[in-house]
Image (cartoon, rainbow, N blue to C red):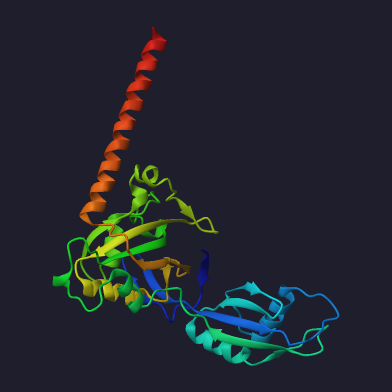
Amino acid sequence: MTVTLVCDHSEAMELCASQQLYLKPVAKLTINVVFPEHTETTRSFSNWEVMDKLKNMICPDRFTSVRVSKSTKDFIRFEGEAETKSLVHILKEKLHGKMIKLNGFKDDLKVVATEAPGDFPTQQEWESSLNKKEITNEEQSEDTTDCIYFEGLPCKWFALKGSDSEKPSEDVLRVVFESFGKIKNIDIPMLDPYREEMVGGNFNKFTFGGLRTFEAFVQYQEYTAFVKAMETLRGMQLMLKGDDGKALACNIKVTSDTTEHFSEGAIQKRSLERLKLQELEEERKRREKREEEEAER
């Protein structure tokens, strides 16, 4: 995950004013540069050479980032990001159907540009995964959760304002995402000192820019609020606007929770595991104290 500087805020929509958080549409373009069939090249070339050709074709506009996602003997696929969705449409017009002349190739290379689909489940997909098609709130069982699983949320963006802590706050998380409806339960695993030992994982994640991120579970009181949140967050980046007017954006992963994280059984299991770890910790402390007392004799 990368954090990018946002200069054009025109398409951003407010998520939470108190935390200066916004949602910004993901603006991505998939670009396939197709090699001619049965062609021979008289020299070697690099993907970066083709990338430079694409950058020149869109001048004076530019990508905020562009990378090679796949390279075969038939084509090179690039993923380019732009500041806004409207700019993506402009870049597509500049690239799609155009030809690239590359030294060493007898024939030109064709460019096929399309707007990249978002990495986000459709309503049909998450309804199917939750087995909730055409059911109402009253018909849901107690163990069924209208719960969203977030990954890649920046810790600092969800910390209490005015505090030196960079740990996320459950209160802040609640305020931010209650814009979609009342929240029933919230869980930030990294705030539980025993959780990492339970799962043998690592909740202290970092982006390439060194920004610490966290994962969270948010369960809404009503299914309609869950649907509103999922639909609103579809294809969006999270954006923070600073006091100086500068804005940063990052991709977050939003999926429906299929683990029944807040079910009675799951909560009880975590409580029992936590109790066992607490007992082991107490036993360790008692053992260390005995060893210290014996050493002093």
Q: Quadrant of residue 223?
A: bottom left
Q: Which quarter shows the C terminus?
A: top left
Residue 180 visible from this viewpoint:
no
In this picture, residue 121 sits left or right of residue 97? left
Q: Is residue 19 above or below residue 228?
A: above
In this picture, residue 144 sits left or right of residue 79? left
Residue 277 visible from this viewpoint:
yes
Q: Nearer the viewer, residue 213 or 78?
A: 78
Q: Quadrant of residue 258?
A: bottom left
- Taking the spot 49% from the left edge, 57% from the top edge, the residue there is 211
Q: Is residue 215 above or below residue 198?
A: below
Give the image location of residue 274, x and y in percent.
Answer: 29, 41
Give the image location of residue 123, x and y in percent.
Answer: 33, 78
The count of marks equals 0
Q: Is residue 278 above or below residue 112?
A: above
Q: Quadrant of residue 154?
A: bottom left
In this picture, residue 105 sits left or right of residue 210? right
